[in-house]
Amino acid sequence: MTMKSLKPTTPEQDPAGKLAKMVIHTTYDDIPPAVIELAKKAIFDTLSVIIAGSSWEVSPQIVEQVTEWGGAAQSTILVYGNKVPATLAAFANGVMARAIDMGDVHETGGHVTEWNVPAMFAALGLSDKPITGKDFLAAYITASEMSVRVNAAMNGCSHASVGIPGEYNGPLCATASVSRLLGLSVEKTWNALGIAYSVHGMSEMQKYAEGTQMVRVQHSFAGETAIKATLLSRRGVTGPKGIFMGVPGGVYRHLEWDDFDVNVLTDDLGTRWHYAEGLSMKPYSACKYTHSFIASTIELMVQNRLDHRDISSICCVGSEGARMTIEPVDAKWTPKTAGEALFSAPYTIATAAITGDVFLGDFSEREILRADKQELMQKIRVTSGPAITDQFEGFPVEICLRDGRVFRHTTPYVKGHTKNPMTWDDLARKFWKCVPYAAVALPEAKLRKIVELCAGLDEVQDVSDLVDALTP
């Protein structure tokens, strides 16, 4: 249906109210064990990304700036250990979670954990009592479920549209988690969500198209907004209630596409967990749309013992969403910065063919400008279209050699997908691969403590213990 076909609603009828109630009233015991286990993995995975992201690109500058701003020593900047106001800790933590583009992605819900977990760790410094692992998990899971549903309702959304749902929904996800952690009522949580919605308008693709650092820094603003919105609501500041369906300015009132299902927002709340149905964790440091290409390229190169110097062409087909990794053509086939390369299908495919992996070391200026990568990129052809119905998975790859041989492969589900999930051992390997990139070296004993605490997060009595392990 289109939004124009829906009847006007009053602000009090907005689905945001039911979503806020779900976030606040759902107990830990209401959540299925499998969902809790997935959440523990996702939080551990995000902390791995934060550790590596602490030194990446713009993160050090953000930390320097918030430290200069200073203020009350409420919360901890992860990895660095600086004590700053909670809003600024959330600002610094946020960029680190997105810096290396290796956080989880939901099949229909977009980016998830990198939105709320950085702000949640900052919010710990504002709590007047210890936050248990169970409390932390419940706040994370319920807000993540809200976030996924909000995006999943927009089945017709594509990256060719005006905005990306997750980019404006991120602040709402973070705000919901923080509101629950700090004990807000349903009404005040709804207000906090309205405040966050009012601050962050619908996002757009320009920051991706130009390869700017705002792709990462937007998470800083989301975390800061979550803390501010929650604290302001707690003091009685009100926000709009008609966040999604409000007339004239609710989020969904701006949409034009036909494949929209408002019922996804609230149907089976508390019994069906969309969050757990499509959350993927990333084995490669790059845009999720490149992962199917990468996995199939590596499979073909390894299984057939191919040499990249023998390749005459590589042809790939992706989904409509994958267009963001091939347009604009100049930037995608001749990337010059890490920001451009992270979102370049040709660069990541060439890297996979040459090195057998795509990880952080592949995004230095020296690596990006390597002659062999530049040469191979010009032999790569990537198209996208409606023939590929899955958003991220099952993209066919064909490698042709100069001697005339042709090799084809399609990876049904890349490692990390819910149908090909990462084990705790897989996540531990990713964690230790990320550790050398930390801006500040963390003692090995603390690193091992992080692994231990995340695996047993539901038994942790004070999540601040995890913050301590995440600082020198």
Image: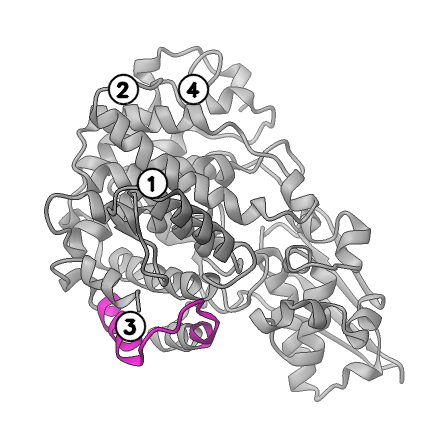
Query: Considering the numbered disc 1 on the image, is that residue within a helix, a strand or a loop?
Result: helix
Region of the chain picked out in magenta, as a range: 433-455
Residue that carries the numbered disc 3 in the rendered image:
451
Position of residue 319 relative to residue 447, above or below, is above
Q: Position of residue 306 (x, y in %)?
A: 74, 86
At 60% from the left and 28% from the top, the residue drawn is 257
Query: Considering the numbered disc 4 on the image, is that residue within a helix, a strand or a loop?
Result: loop
Q: Amino acid at mark 1?
A: Thr
Q: Amino acid at mark 4?
A: Met
Within 10 angstroms of label 2, few (less than 14), some, or many (20 or more) residues?
some
Q: Position of residue 469 (x, y in %)?
A: 26, 67
The tag earlier along the polypeptide, 2 or 3, is 2
Residue that carries the numbered disc 4 in the rendered image:
245
Distance between the Cα atoms at labels 2 and 1? 17 Å
What numbered label is drawn on residue 87? 1
**Of discs 4 and 1, which sits in the foreground?**
1
Display colour scheme:
one colour
Position of residue 271 relative to residue 380, above or below, is above
Distance between the Cα atoms at labels 4 and 1? 29 Å
At 51% from the left and 39% from the top, the residue drawn is 167
Q: Amino acid at mark 2?
A: Val
Distance between the Cα atoms at labels 3 and 4? 42 Å
Query: Considering the numbered disc 3 on the image, is that residue within a helix, a strand or a loop?
Result: helix
Q: Position of residue 22 (x, y in %)?
A: 24, 35
* Residue found at the far right of this picture: 403
